[in-house]
Image (cartoon, rainbow, N blue to C red):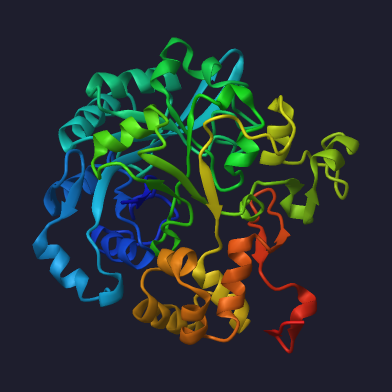
Amino acid sequence: MEFIADLHIHSSYSRATSSRMDLENLYIWAQLKGIAVISTGDFTHPRWYAQLQEKLEPAEPGLYRLKDCHARAADEQVPESCRAPVRFILSVEISTIYKKNDRTRKVHSLILAPDLLAAGRLNAALQEIGNISSDGRPILGLDCKRLLDLALDASSGNVLIPAHIWTPHFSVLGSASGFDSIEECFEDLTPHIFALETGLSSDPAMNWRISMLDRFALVSNSDAHSPSKLGREANIFTCPKDYFSMMRALRDKNPAGFRGTIEFFPEEGKYHLDGHRACSQRLTPEQTRAAQGRCPACGAKVTVGVMHRVNDLADRDPGNRPHGAFDFESLIPLEEILSEIYATGPQSKKVQGAYMRLLRELGSEFEILRRRSPADLKAAGPPLLAEAITRLRAGHVALQPGYDGVYGVITVFDRDEKIAGQPRLL
């Protein structure tokens, strides 16, 4: 039986993160979304680590559950239609800034741990190197290879996955401070890297253009900073629901254990194209090259986005799918679909009321977006919901790509289909 896992999120102890990112809300929102295994995030932060020790208890091997005394009250906030077991997987994102091969490197890494003792040993080692108390995502002056070495020393079960690998300023392959290969970063420890997180601004098809990535499993996660963002990207597993089976399925690229990913449309990611946010300049790679990397409006250096960077490293044409590549589904969050239908903000009372009513009637968000029939969607409403999700599943969307930190906009109804702020069908 398949289950969905989101392996990369943040707690309330990370900067620019909602105060509602506590274990109880993660537990609630995982059920609303339809996520069976949710990351804890931030296990290096002492106060968050203490909460993990206090509120979680071991479940299946390498996974944890919320203790009953905390889960009972949280369950009351979950509609019966969405209630399901939730498991937690220990994780943290580490930011490393260091000099290598005459360049300053800024790389984010996701580390997963099979138990609190393994996490605690890594925390103790990192505490000797830098301040892990100031932020849930600590910033350390540490070579990525050394970080991987420390993680493996703490436990052979620890796993390092390079995070959002194409983000321009903070990733292993990013245009501004990354490397040109995974091997350049991790050297002789590269065999311990078996999965890469593609990030919101790329999807597997973009990564398939680069043959040196073929041996890695491509994973996707939300990197959520607020509960409603959980599962905006996620992973579909079909292995036994335990840490070791999940990691083995990724390591072996086993189609019997790992089915693929749930994705943003990459154009919605905030670094998909090149650009200069201050001047509202969005550029294709071709336009950037023609402008010699400068903003057409002010002459400042533009941020080279993910599509451009993929093009630079690609050795295959678009559309080439390597042998053994996993499937993926591109979705738009349900709140965004309802926001478009109602022509009001996703956090408005109207949208939030419709969102919770749909969950009560039809089940979790993933159940609605991926499984429910058009007839069910039409009966539950609102008007145009069935048409919107039918178009989404077919990939019939309008794309306004993101750039230089500005999220893109993905819609299912184009401008010509709107009258007085409400979509209509032609």
* Observer-nearest of 354 and 153: 354
The answer to whether residue 220 is left or right of residue 290 is: left
Q: Say which residue appears at 12% left-offset and 51% top-offset.
A: 54
Residue extending farthest right: 290
The answer to whether residue 11 is left or right of residue 52 is: right
* Observer-nearest of 154 and 380: 380
Q: Is residue 135 above or below residue 112?
A: below
Q: Is residue 310 above or below residue 331?
A: above
The answer to whether residue 213 is left or right of residue 228 is: right
Q: Indicate the quadrant where residue 388 lies.
A: bottom right
Q: Say which residue appears at 25% left-offset and 45% top-offset.
A: 241
Q: Indicate the quadrant where residue 331 lies.
A: bottom right
The answer to whether residue 310 is left or right of residue 339 is: right
x, y percentage for residue 138? 38, 37
Q: Is residue 45 visible?
A: yes
Q: Indicate the quadrant where residue 175 lies.
A: top right
Residue extending farthest left: 69
Q: Is residue 345 visible?
A: no
Q: How many marks?
A: 0
x, y percentage for residue 112? 31, 35
Quarter of the C terminus within the rendering = bottom right
Q: Say which residue appears at 53% left-offset and 76% top-offset.
A: 374
x, y percentage for residue 182? 53, 21
Residue extending farthest top: 188
Q: Is residue 6 above or below residue 378?
A: above
x, y percentage for residue 338? 55, 77
